[in-house]
Amino acid sequence: MPDFKLQSEPLPETGQPVGLKVDTAPASRPGPTTIEGRYGRIEKLQDHHAADLWDAVRGHDDLWTYMADGPFDDADAFARFIAKRAGLADPYAFAIVDSKGRAAGYFTLLEIRPEMRVIEVGHVLYAPALKQTQLGTEAQYLLARYVFDTLGYRRYEWKCNALNAPSRRAALRYGFVFEGVFRNAIVVKGRNRDTAWYSMIDNEWPARKTAFGRWLAPDNFDVQGRQKISLGQMNGLAG
């Protein structure tokens, strides 16, 4: 199990250890915005993204194995799903758009608690063409920067099926810290899901932000586009 150093101070009246005081001003809720990056952008998910997304993910039913939704039988069913997802305030969805203007994936901010300044990233759908690309990582950087620097959250969560090894590796690579597994947490598609919890907190964000920036810099890639130093290494992972 992870070993966290708890931050505390004595309560003046009793001397008992209590948590440090924090700014109690609430964070902001996510809203319609477009955030440009070097390799693409993220923007509010809308109905018109459905066609590009369907072209990008159709025939890849494995993308939906650990998702609560999908796979979908046809473009119309998928378009209805995207329209519904685009209309929700929580989860609040963003399309990931490549340099040619095509949507190649989406993700959401959910479990939004402005008063506690806690928010989660989830429902992450990456088309095969987006995986292991600069944009795939940059999209996560742009969303995290929006969460911490613009909206003012102090805790950013990543949760996934404990059996979803790629998602668990991604969480660590992006700089989230493993906190544990909640057994029998929920039921998804009629099956038990044990949920692995990860988080990134506000005082960790500056170092994570620097690592993202270093990894995304053009000089971190050779002429074939291969990385020189991995993001995991920059975030302290071995190997």
Image: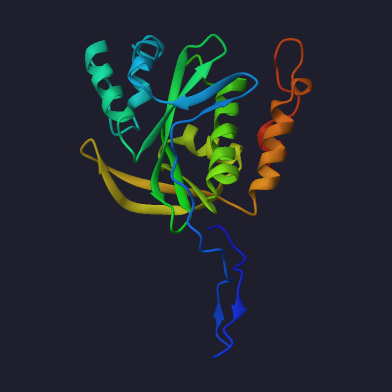
* Residue at the image position 60 percent from the left and 44 percent from the top: 149
Horizontal and vertical percent position of residue 122: 42, 37
Q: Quadrant of the C terminus?
A: top right
Query: How is this picture coloured?
Result: rainbow
Is any part of residue 24 visible from this angle?
yes
* Residue at the image position 59 percent from the left and 62 percent from the top: 4
Above-or-below relation of 10 to 174:
below
Compare residues 83 and 150 and report the one nearer the observer: 150
Residue lying farthest to the bottom in this orientation: 14
Is any part of residue 239 visible from this angle?
no
Compare residues 188 and 106 and report the one nearer the observer: 106
* Residue at the image position 55 percent from the left and 85 percent from the top: 16
Horizontal and vertical percent position of residue 32: 44, 31
Horizontal and vertical percent position of residue 41: 55, 22
Residue 193 appears in which quarter of the rendering? top left
| Horizontal side, residue 118 vs residue 233: left or right | left
| Horizontal side, residue 33 vs residue 90: left or right | right
Above-or-below relation of 144 to 95:
below
Residue 79 appears in which quarter of the rendering? top left
* Residue at the image position 60 percent from the left and 37 percent from the top: 173
Residue lying farthest to the right in this orientation: 219
Horizontal and vertical percent position of residue 184: 30, 51
